[in-house]
Image: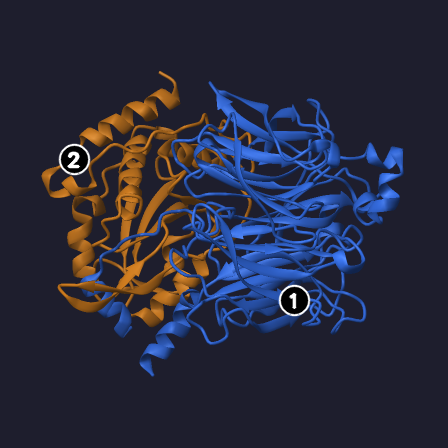
Chain colours: A orange, B blue
Amino acid sequence: MSRGAAVRALLLLAAAWAPAAQAHHAGLLPPLEFDPPPAGSYVLHRIMPAPEGRVLGLDGRPAALSTYTRGKLTLLGFIYTTCVDPEGCPLAYRVFDALQEAIVAAPALHDKVRFVTLSFDPARDTPQAMRAYAGSRAVEKGAGLRWYFLTTGSARELLPLVEGFGQDLRTTPGSAGGRARRELSHVLKVFLIDHAGDIREIYTSNFLHPQVVLNDIETLLAE
Amino acid sequence: MRNLSVAAALLAGAAFAVHADETCNSPYIAKLIKGQEDYVYVWTLGVEGLGDGSDKLVTVDVNPRSKRYGKVIHSASTGARVEAHHMGFTDDRRLIWAGGLADNRIWVFDIATDPAKPRIVQTISDLGERSGWLGPHTYYAMPGRMLVQALSNTQDKGGRTGMALYSNRGKFLASHAMPTDQGGDGYGYDLAVNPRKNVLLTSSFTGYANYMRPIGELMKDGEAMKKFGATMAVWDLKAMKPAQVFSVPGAPLEIRWSLNPKDNWAITAAALTSKLWLVKQEGKQWVAKEVGTIGDPAKIPLPVDISITRDGKGLWVNTFMDGKTRYFDLANPEAPKQTYEKVTGKQINMISQSWDGKRLYITSSLLANWDKGGADNEQFLRAFVWDGKALAQKFEVDFTKEKLGRAHHMKLGSRALRDEAKRQDEAKK
């Protein structure tokens, strides 16, 4: 079975794998409408360094973000736990899930990659809320692949990170329950960061696909 | 903090769809203006003896509810005159990159701090040194990066050229030459991406030696007139490698992908032959087809800019020489049908539309040495409304009377796109 076929099979597996507690993340990933170029046949430029800042892990302890963005390849995405847009956080979650399955199945990728999910929403997404959101995903399932769920202590700590990644975020007037509210919105971006902490690819929803990301991971590992 | 807390408690959480507001922008650009735009930014060529004589970014208030509707409210001058031509937003829509065809400098304007008052925050000047290209034309937002298509090169100032990739912070990353094999002619003009297909599509024009010459002189030079692009190329976007090259005679210019996710085609207009061309995926291959004629090609109406509707069902075409704005029904993109036309100026060039297609903006200038002379040398921004049947002019800014220069490329702006930190500071007050 080719690696591409293996990935497709894993995607179907991932789509089918949807524990009840995580049912909102289930669903088929959008099909990939092109044959990506082979890993190593292209260059991923050093776009910019990942920003530095203070984050909180699930245990509530502060740490430098660079603790989670250096030394391995890092796939980092921003989320907020109540995001329901199908092209937003849930899509990223499904892709991370599928990638996790693929990496576990590929010994050459073991101990080489980490995932980071960072909340946009420090007030609601406390470490405790992130722990509930992460569920069993925060537990290493072998293959040396850790999935870290991080938040920040305040908007003051969050905004420099958002800006440093070039991640769009804004609040807009809205309404809920008949009362005027402010809503949070963003365009999905997922960042592939190399061992040195440089951002090498930025995925948007229209090409965020496990097969593309796997090729990029292999391209960086071959450097 | 407070805003985020409130937001977090209640958020409806709708992430923006990845589309542009004015329909010709990069699909990676965030922040739709779904409603009424507040500003039109006009990248304006300086004219010697007019105002400060420099290229500048002019802000016009276009919100009908504003007391300043139809008025110039700001001008950010570069202090240079280098044939200002096109500009583009970064993907986060916080910056505009703009440049000129007679030079290699790129000015970066901050439009997030105060969208009404863009200000220059950076000047990038290493394009020629790093890539060898000259005359940056198209500024196309990629995630975290800007892909710049040039028209010429520093060596012979001919049409052989390429693209340069920069980070949003202005760091040069890579250079890519336009193909000269597979039938490629090495010329460049516009570029446009279809991310779902991993396809970059490029078109071709001519080099500095031609576009900087007076048009009358140029058209009498048979050898020079042979030096125009006649190709389009499909690239593997991820690999940034040309995959297919098509023969598209007559300088194919602006490229517009249908924004309908079900569509798999882009359209362009060839300036010198006045033809519409469709580039379409058939199976795994792409093909280029001549699908229509714009006006009477024998009269060289010179189609210069096109703007596609957000549903991919209609196309506006501006022709410079006869000053006509035409609408084509694209229900069948393989057989576009003109259904409307109106003379919108004695000379017209760029056309931009709001996302809902109800408002159109038109400017006048093509190139300093190609614009008409005397009374025909109108320089303006004109705003129109479109009711599906006819265009009705709402206002005009006379760029000569206002001592601004030659009005060229436009982008739309909104007060709602202010920097989030600034918005939060204001909320605290």
User: What whole-number distance in Å separates the C-alpha atoms at marks 2 and 1?
Assistant: 62 Å
Residue B31 - label: none
> Going by the image, does B235 lie left or right of A177?
right
At numbered mark 1, what does the secondary structure look like: helix, strand or loop?
strand
Query: Which three-letter amino acid code belongs to the residue tagged 2?
Result: Ala
* Mark 1 crowd level (few <14, some 14–19, many ≥20, 10 Å Cα): some
- The residue furthest top is A1
Which residue is found at the position 26% from the left and 48% from the top?
Answer: A85
Chain letter of the residue carrying label 2: A
Residue A103: image location, x then y, percent = 33, 33
Q: Nearer the viewer, residue B300 or B279?
A: B300
Residue A34: image location, x then y, percent = 44, 27
Residue A37: image location, x then y, percent = 50, 28
Q: Nearer the viewer, residue B397 or B10?
A: B397
* Mark 2 crowd level (few <14, some 14–19, many ≥20, 10 Å Cα): some
Q: Find out whether the residues at labels 2 and 1 contact each other: C-beta distance under 8 Å.
A: no
- The residue furthest left is A20
Residue B357: tell me if it is visible: yes
Quadrant location, the N terminus of chain A: top left
Residue wearing tag 2 = A18
Which residue is found at the position 71% from the left and 24% from the top?
Answer: B181
Looking at the rendered structure, whether the residues under marks 2 and 1 are on a common chain is answered as no
> Going by the image, does A84 lie left or right of B165?
left
Residue A144: tell me if it is visible: no
Which residue is found at the position 32% from the left and 35% from the top?
Answer: A99
- The residue furthest bottom is B429
Residue wearing tag 1 = B398
> Going by the image, does B57 lie left or right of B238?
right
Q: Taking A147 as reference, is A179 above or below it?
A: below
Q: Nearer the viewer, residue B407 or A188?
A: B407
Query: Which three-letter amino acid code belongs to the residue tagged 1?
Result: Asp
